[in-house]
Amino acid sequence: MMLSQRVRTIEPSATLGLNAIIQKLKADGRDIVNFSVGEPDFDTPEFIREAGKRAIDSGKTRYTPVPGTPEFRQAVADYVGSQRGESIDASEVVICSGAKQALTNAFASLCDPGDEVLLPAPYWVSYPDEIRLAEATPVVVYPAEDAQFRITPEALAPHVTPRTAGLIINSPSNPTGVIYSPTEIAALVDFAEQNDLWIISDEIYERFVFEGTFASPFAGKGRERTILVSGLSKSFAMTGWRLGWAVGDKSIIGGMSRLQGHTASNACTISQYAGLEAVKQHDHADLQAMIAAFDERRLLAVERLAEIEGLVTLHPEGAFYLFVDVRNFLSDGATTTEFCEALLDEKGVATVPGEAFGTPGWLRLSYARSIEEMERGLKLFKDHLSVR
Ligand SMILES: Cc1ncc(COP(=O)(O)O)c(C=O)c1O
């Protein structure tokens, strides 16, 4: 029996693969500082957990409508709309099992075979495979490093062909931590309009905004061509509840719902009830405390990394990642993956090599770690670099 061409071309998720190695090292008794994680180290706040328990005890355990319960869709429409100054109808929202499913279903609903999708690097690991699964082609575009990898219309323009169908924007960005300004977003919306492209705007880190102003292309004239993807995984420390959404044009959202109806049905019912409470109380003190803790860690990490001579760190404005250039520290011919493996093996510090994001020479550190662990891990990281 032969595995299909479609599945043969899928690369295993680099970050999930790395996590498996770390778990094995831990099981062998190694002390690991794990800077490779892509999720908050906080537990889901109690008020959300309680809502989940209440849902179980009151029998909210059956199927819901495929795109989500009417109350939750409405609450998400209100929440997303209020954050962006837009009025959104519940019919423009589909609830999915995580932002990942929202993205996969969005690509499947927007792409025809052979379509090209502009993908700025460094990019989140799953986009290329999600695009390929939709039988479309990711066209990776490399913005200028000295502009903090911020993508611009000028950098995108040479890559537009008659097959170009869409553009991905991810702000705040994983892995760079960069946030696009309202002016930068407006320029990208103009570019999409001029070239008649749709935009998938992945806003999963929308609450992790420490500097600058968050702007979404899903506003004003950009709204009609944008599918906004976000969810509760990161901002509400709810990764395991698997809850995300897409917001956009009713016909695309309808298409995504039909697709979901035959593949996954509704997102977990219990999670939807917990999520309802989460978005209703999105300014809850527990959530604010978590965001404040991330900011404190960010500032500490920036300070510590600045102490390492020869190391360039992109200034992190949002999300919870630091993107550092380690090219000065690579021994002759070594890849960043080999560098990260040595760092893990010799110092017990886990990071993600830039190859996973399309930018070798760089690596990503997550600051979803306690202050104590960060201090320890960054010291080990510095020691490792000082002997190179
Ligand atoms: C940029 C980006 N988009 C989407 C996701 C997926 O989020 P979810 O866990 O809600 O599927 C992640 C998670 O790592 C991410 O970093």
Image (tube, rainbow, N blue to C red):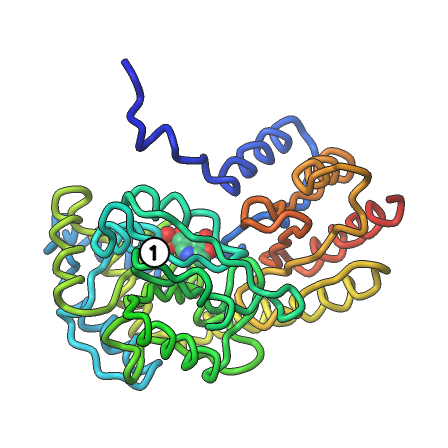
Q: Is residue 13 visible from the viewing direction of this image?
A: yes
Residue type marked 1: Ala
Which class describes the residues within 10 Å of circle 1: few (<14), some (14-19), or many (20+)?
Answer: many
Quadrant containing ligand 1: bottom left
Q: How far from the left and from the top, in percent, is residue 297?
A: 65, 66
Question: Residue 133 is drawn in which quadrant?
Answer: top left
Position above or below: 209 against 200 = below
Q: Is residue 56 visible from the viewing direction of this image?
A: no
Query: Along the line of sight, which residue is nearer the eye, 247 or 279?
Result: 247
- Considering the image in quadrants, where does the C terminus appear? top right
Q: From the viewer's perspective, tell me whether residue 238 is left or right of residue 309.
A: left
Q: How far from the left and from the top, in percent, is residue 124?
A: 48, 53
Question: Residue 192 is drawn in which quadrant?
Answer: bottom left
User: Does dot 1 land on a helix, a strand or a loop?
Assistant: helix
Position above or below: 9 against 212 = above
- Considering the image in quadrants, where does the N terminus appear? top left
* Disc 1 within 8 angstroms of ligand 1 (CB): yes
Residue furthest top as drawn = 1
Residue positioned 59% across, 73% down in the render:
317
Query: Along the line of sight, which residue is nearer the eye, 156 or 70?
Result: 156
Q: From the viewer's perspective, tell me whether residue 27 is left or right of residue 55.
A: right
Residue positioned 39% across, 43% down in the render:
129
Residue positioned 17% across, 59% down in the render:
68
Q: To which residue does mark 1 refer?
A: 99
Q: How far from the left and from the top, in percent, is residue 132?
A: 34, 43
Residue positioned 46% across, 63% down in the render:
158
Q: From the viewer's perspective, tell me whether residue 318 is left or right of residue 328.
A: left
Residue furthest right as drawn = 387
